[in-house]
Image: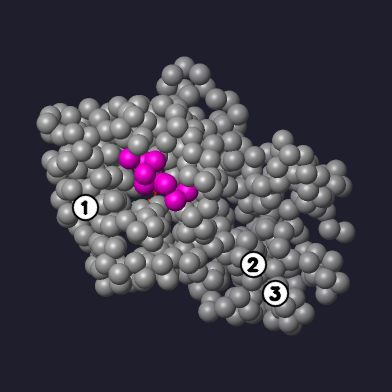
Amino acid sequence: MKIGIIGTGYVGLPTGVGLAELGNEVVCVDKAKDKIDDLKAGKLTIYEEGLDKLFQKNFNAGRLSFTTSMRKAVSGADVVLIAVGTPPHPITHEADMKYIYAAATELAEYLTDYTVIATKSTVPVGTGDNIEQLIRTKNPTARFDVISLPEFLREGFAIYDFFNPDRIVVGSNSEKATEVIKELYAPFIDKTQMLFVSRRSSETIKYASNAFLAMKIHYINEIANFCEKSGADVAEVAKGMGLDKRIGNRFLNAGLGFGGSCFPKDTMAMAYMGRLVGTPIELIETTIAGNQKRKQDMAERVLQSVKQIPNAKIAVWGLAFKDGTDDCRQSPAMDVIGVLLQNKADIIAYDPKAMGTACRILGDKIAYADDMYSAVKDADVLVILTEWKEFSTADLQGMSQLMRHKKIMDFRNMLDADEAVKLGFEYQCIGRKIS
Ligand code: NAD
């Protein structure tokens, strides 16, 4: 099949690579010329485990190409996937739809034969109707259907998730479009659940799922606060809860709160939609406010720990919003750093993959270390903000010689607490009081 993909970001690019690997001819269009120039030169623009190899293979085989021309991506395509951003509106916090509607308007004039236009972006309920209307107005003779095909991939696991989806949700009001999508996803039909629902249900499934996961994270963080006061250990509590199949063990890691380019904006958009139709969703409203406070509270713990140390040097491990990605959008680590900077903190940071993206946001407001150990040299406290695996095997003995004060604030519960205490560290983690 010929596939056009509009937007080559964290969703569009791995999806394009995956569809090319399945044998399709994929043309990716993006209006960001610098991105397209890099991709055309065979240079990846994001970090994702396993992406590089598949990208090079399909790019060299000529199944995957990149362009800034909407016409090249759309005309003659069987399926056009829209994967542009839907960031929060700066004032109302609803999903800002300007990129979606711009893409729909631009693509309309290049539709030739019958085309399925599938929205991969996370969009408010009713968006499919609006896209359909826009295209029909711009190109009244075009033959097309608009479907919702929400994306559930996790950054850091985008390629794995593409080939091993938990489920594929197809929101379609057209039999013909459904058949095209069944053909596109034929390689997955035997190994995953495909759910066919109405377009509006599909649009809602995506928001309702993300909001639920965000609530789960916020819930375990509240339980962690309770454990710290009551003498329980949140890791043990989460393990015990997770053994109940109705609850499940995922998204029960207490920590800094949720972040990234999806959960914060999707919870806000879902809350907005609830208010819009006159049914405020209180659980989500509470989750949003609680998650915001969480990051402030964690930053205050850090400030408290260095209160007595003049010109304290704060070492930070982790800048990305989670491990496995270089994405710093809405990173809880960045939020904590923001509060620390407002308090004139002297910060040096290290992240295995996100130094470039973080530096583009923070510039020279902080210093950057080449590796985790140079970050802690002469530091007064180490704060762990992202759960990169390599942090869990840190040489604590060696670090105890490097640091000026032996203080660790492990907000991702990564280190061996007993060993840290034995080596004389003042060690704080989440959801457990260390004596
Ligand atoms: P992104 O910002 O990384 O990429 C979007 C790309 O679209 C950018 O490169 C931008 O230049 C391009 N673009 C915008 N308007 C365009 C236009 N008119 N023509 C061509 N290109 C255009 O965004 P993302 O993280 O890939 O997210 C895309 C959508 O997918 C969002 O709605 C998001 O909520 C959803 N989503 C994201 C994830 C994730 O993990 N990032 C997961 C599931 C769903």
Between the residue at mark 1 and the residue at mark 3, the CA separation in whole angstroms equals: 47 Å
Q: Is mark 2 within 8 Å of ligand 1?
A: no
> Which mark, residue 73?
1
Per the image, label 3 sits on a secondary structure element best described as loop
> Which mark, residue 389?
2
Upstream in the sequence, badge 1 or badge 3? 1
Between the residue at mark 1 and the residue at mark 2, the CA separation in whole angstroms equals: 39 Å
Q: Residue beneath label 3, please? A: 394
Dot in front, 2 or 3: 2
Q: Main secondary structure of the magenta part?
A: helix
Q: Badge 2: few (under 14), some or many (20 or more) residues near its Cα, within 10 Å?
A: few
Dot in front, 1 or 2: 1
The magenta stretch spans residue 379: no
Upstream in the sequence, badge 1 or badge 2? 1
> Residue 322, image x and y in percent?
56, 57
> Residue 327, image x and y in percent?
46, 59
Residue 263 visible (yes or no): no
Upstream in the sequence, badge 2 or badge 3? 2
Name the residue nearer the viewer: 18 or 188.
188
What residue do we see at 29% from left, 51% from top? 1
Q: Amino acid at mark 1?
A: Ala
